[in-house]
Amino acid sequence: MADLPAVPERPAFLEPTAVPQLSLRGAPPASSPDALLSLLRNAGAAPNVVEATATWLARRKSLHSRTAYAKDASWWLAWCAASEANPALARPLQADQYAAALAEAELAKSTRARRLAAASSWYAYLVRAEAAERNPFFGMERPSVSADDSPTRGMTAAQLAALLTYARKHETARTYALLVMLAVTAARIGSILNAPVGALGHDQGHRVIDLITKRDHKKRFALVPMAVEAVEALLAERGQPEPEDLLFVTNTGKPMDEPAAFRLVRRVAGAAGLPHADQLSPHSLRHSYATALLSKGVPLADVQDAMGHADPRTTRRYDRAAGALDRSPSYKMQDEITAAMRALEGE
């Protein structure tokens, strides 16, 4: 194999004017592996950088993982463009400034940690492929994500019922089916949005769907009757799409992305009258699945398996999140105070 061309001393990697106004929230600068490679080419990245990046992405087994890495890495490139930094020559100081910008954007610790990890992984591979001289993220202190640290807001069973009832009566078959799938499978939104119609099937008398989960594993989920009914209505509305077609697409037939699903959950929750609609997300339905079942006494091991958690401590986080509020000593403190207040009023 021929030697890769050397990186130019000062390559025109990204033009400073590419992203004059940058928000570190919302839709990522690149929404797919191909989009990330196009971003690099259009910005004038050296050919060996583009080739190494393509190989770095290809090492991920599933399209879902490749897409996730591409999205997260693209935020760093966009920040470099907006701040007139050349990522091919980036130094630790600039990586630290990027980390500070993520914090200033008030992103969740888990989101910040994931984006920094993606950028570091990309550079580590570029160095290995002799397409970069250093990894500016090496040795960086990244946000510590505790097992108990979850910004996700959940819903009670009654709130979930209100959400789904409203969607069934007033929304499209697609919207209702997506919300039902999230509510009764506890699958991650990325797994559901990347599922083709052909992932639907039967197994031992159950209706099922096979989804790609974390670490590129395939997991079979049972579809309860309300999910089957919702999905069948969706397929009928779409005119029975082909097995290779994605289950959830936009009105124009394009893949539905996670930001769109995020907006959909908040919009429908607001219309349904949920008091914290502006704090909900697709993950809120997964969160609610775990807290509701654990509060009903469903064995931790069963919930862990349904959630796809490798470590039971991850599942217990949901139990603590729900129980901590129910068992808060503040309620007992209120009883003590109000009792004392009544005593004073009786004097």
Image (cartoon, grey):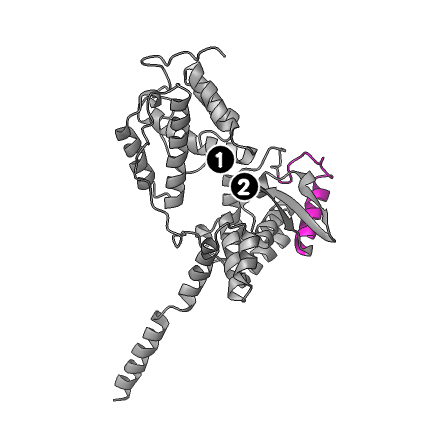
- Magenta span: 226-248
Q: Residue at x 30, y 83 (%)?
A: 342
Q: Is residue 205 left or right of residue 66?
A: right
Query: Residue most toward the bottom?
Result: 347
Say whether disc 1 or disc 2 marks the residue closer to the N-terminus. Answer: 1
Q: Please tell me in which quadrant of the rendered image residue 327 appears.
A: bottom left
Image coordinates for residue 39, horizontal then vertical, percent:
45, 22
From the viewer's perspective, is 193 left or right of 103?
A: right
Q: Kindly state the secondary structure of the residue where label 2 is placed.
A: helix
Q: Position of residue 138 (x, y in %)?
A: 32, 32
Q: Residue at x 73, y 48 (%)?
A: 202
Q: Are discs 1 and 2 less than 8 Å apart at CB?
A: yes
Looking at this rendering, what residue extends furthest in the front direction? 1
Residue type marked 2: Gly
- Between 103 and 209, which is closer to the camera in this rendering? 209
> Crowding at label 2, few (<14), some or many (≥20) Cα neighbours within 10 Å?
many
